[in-house]
Image (cartoon, rainbow, N blue to C red):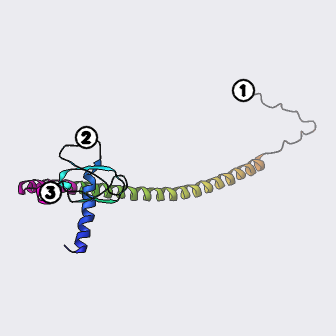
Amino acid sequence: MSEDSKQTFEESSLSDAAVSSRELDLEDVPSTDIVFECPHCGKSLSIDPRGAGLVIRCTQCGKPVTVPIPEGMSIEDFDATPEELSAQLLNTRKGLARAQRRVAELEAEVASLRSFREGALRFRAALGEDKTVRSSILARALREQEAALAALRELSVLTEDPPAPPKEGAAQVPPPLPQG
């Protein structure tokens, strides 16, 4: 095995096996698990027998640790049978199909959300323009109203006749009584 492929294998082993490694609680550890200690920090670790020979990360110190192969066994003893591999492949394909469907659903949801966001931004921009237009219309109406009010005042001043002084000798007519 070349150095590059060995490193790639170890990196993939680190990520794959780290998921199945767990903290050691002797009551929960199946008797078939491989129990060993981290050579770096001494932490007790447990892993499924299929992890024998893999490189994992210690749950405490995070350093890479090679899972030991139990005495009297070889790595081939842990290899899956063709039936097990077929079942794993079938399960992996089903999982992949589910994941692809979920990705399609999420992509559709993202597209919908993007469309909604763009519509909201357009609406917000239009609303901002409406506010500007409304403000200028209201300002103009206010100016016109003030001008009309000023014109009415001026008109009322012009149309008011000052009371004429009474003529001498003329009879004075009293103002009309309010009716009510």
> Which residue is under mark 1?
179
SS type, badge 3: helix
Residue at 14 percent across and 59 percent down: it is 75
SS type, badge 1: loop
Residue at 28 percent across and 48 percent down: it is 22
Query: Which x, y percent locates residue 108?
Result: 28, 56
Q: Nearer the viewer, mark 3 or mark 1?
A: 3
Q: Are marks 3 and 1 in contact (CB under 8 Å)?
A: no
Query: Which x, y percent locates residue 85?
Result: 10, 57
Amino acid at the residue labelled 1: Gln
> Which residue is under mark 2?
28
Q: Main secondary structure of the magenta part?
A: helix
Residues at marks 3 and 1, CA–CA distance in whole angstroms: 100 Å
Q: Are marks 1 and 2 in contact (CB under 8 Å)?
A: no
Q: Is residue 86 left or right of residue 178?
A: left
The residue closer to the viewer here, 48 or 137, is 48
N-terminal label among 1 and 2? 2
Amino acid at the residue labelled 2: Asp
Q: Nearer the viewer, mark 1 or mark 2?
A: 2
Q: Quadrant of residue 39?
A: bottom left
| Quarter of the image with the C terminus in it | top right
The residue closer to the viewer here, 76 or 166, is 76
Q: Which residues are magenta?
A: 72-100
Residues at marks 2 and 3, CA–CA distance in whole angstroms: 31 Å
Tell me the number on the disc at residue 33.
Answer: none
Say above or below: 175 vs 108. above
Query: Which x, y percent locates residue 26?
Result: 27, 41
N-terminal label among 2 and 3? 2
Identify the residue at the far top of this view. Answer: 180
Residues at marks 1 and 2, CA–CA distance in whole angstroms: 105 Å
> Which residue is under mark 3?
93
